[in-house]
Amino acid sequence: MPLLDLPNELLRDISEYLESEKDINAVAQANRRLYDLLDSYLYRYNVQQSGSSALLWAAQHGQEETAQKSLREKANIEATNDDEEAPLLLAAKNEHKQVVKLLVDKRADVNAQGGLYGNALQAASYRGHEAVVKMLLDKGADVNAQGGEYGNALQAASSEGHEAVVKMLLDKGADVNAQGGHFGNTLQAASYRCHEAVVKMLLDKGADINAQSRHYGNALQAASYRGHEAVVKMLLDKGADVNAQGWILRQHTQAASSEGHEAVVKMLLDKGADVNVQSGVHSNTLQAASSGGHEAVVRQLLDKGADVNAQGGYFGNALQAASYRGHEAVVKMLLDKGADVNAQGGYFGNALQAASYRGHEAVVRQLLDKGAEINAQSGEYGNALYAASSGGHEAVVKMLLNKGADVNAQDGDLSNALQAASDGGHEAVVKLLVAWGAKSS
């Protein structure tokens, strides 16, 4: 008997022996009768055997009819995908308004937590989906719910500069000073991303201009680091503390200096920023600018009285920082301004060892011409020759030897340049050192 001549009850019984949705769907697509007969079974099977994946797919792609069919067969409205995203969050994130309405009408938890954005409101706010945000708020979404990448919906919307959404959230009582999330607080998010209108809106709503967080310190430091002149000016005009400390760069001028934002540095200095304040990984603004090779900023800082020999930070001083990075023009500028060529401190002990380790021939020559002590002992590699040898920098090794470097000088671990070159597999340097009388340590 042909398959299609069988009664419906028997066809349903046969379909229950099919072992996958793919097989059920293939049969259902054969003709209209089979489709009408098996379509609901297909969705029921998906609910029972595949974790309501059809509803998740429908929410992701905005397929309202598919979502309705899945829900009709008792799909789990709070099911989540591998990223812990529920259907409502998926629909909200992708601005599928009709699916969002369907889900909330079916009592999906409007405050369910999960996924990168934490909840549906934060996802819609981050994407700037005004209508969805309004719908969620009208259905009772907690405007101050915490969680997710941005901490809360207001920070998410502010980070992307969605003015209308920011206004909507504030009007619904969003806490303008809530802490948390990637940027620490909303004002920092808007300042870091240079959304002037949002920054103004937040300040007008009472945002704490000097609020601190562990990520970017505060709003002024975030804007300074990114070089956003208009936002920096706005924050300063509103009373931001120009010498406030925080974050890894710790102070605003250092943040701007590290990135070479000349106009911002000038603005901060004109507002009374302490040019010699000590803090952060670079210790001071001059070292930050020198490490980045920002000549104009270095010049500006020196003209404003920056201490050229200030000690501290990873590199010990500005000269060592510039030498390590190979910034010849900055090295010259610092030396011309009285930088101590033999100043001790920092990871590499002195500028010569730092430049030698990186193989910066021109800087090594500069330092030696200015009287750098060639056999000075200190720092991670003990002496300049050891540092250059460990890096396999043959030209620098030769230069140091020609200038009188002690070929058998030992570092703190009783090793010497020959062993360092040998351990590093630098055959040419090994031959050169042996030719100069190096002995195994």
Image (cartoon, rainbow, N blue to C red):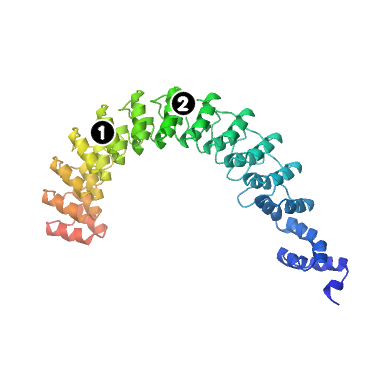
Label 1 vs label 2, nearer the camera: 1
The image position of residue 39, as x and y in percent, is 78, 60
Dot 1 corresponds to which residue? Answer: 299
- Looking at the image, the residue that sits furthest to the bottom is 1
Q: Amino acid at mark 2?
A: Asn
Q: Quadrant of residue 156?
A: top right
Dot 2 corresponds to which residue? Answer: 210
The residue closer to the viewer here, 388 or 306, is: 306
Q: Amino acid at mark 1?
A: Arg
Q: Quadrant of residue 267?
A: top left
Residue drawn at 26 percent across, 44 percent down = 324
Residue drawn at 27 percent across, 27 percent down = 304
Residue 346 seen anywhere in this rendered image of the structure = yes
Disc with the residue nearer the chain's start (1 vs 2): 2
For the C terminus, the image quarter is bottom left
Horizontally, residue 93 falls left or right of residue 369, namely right
The image position of residue 325, as x and y in percent, is 28, 45
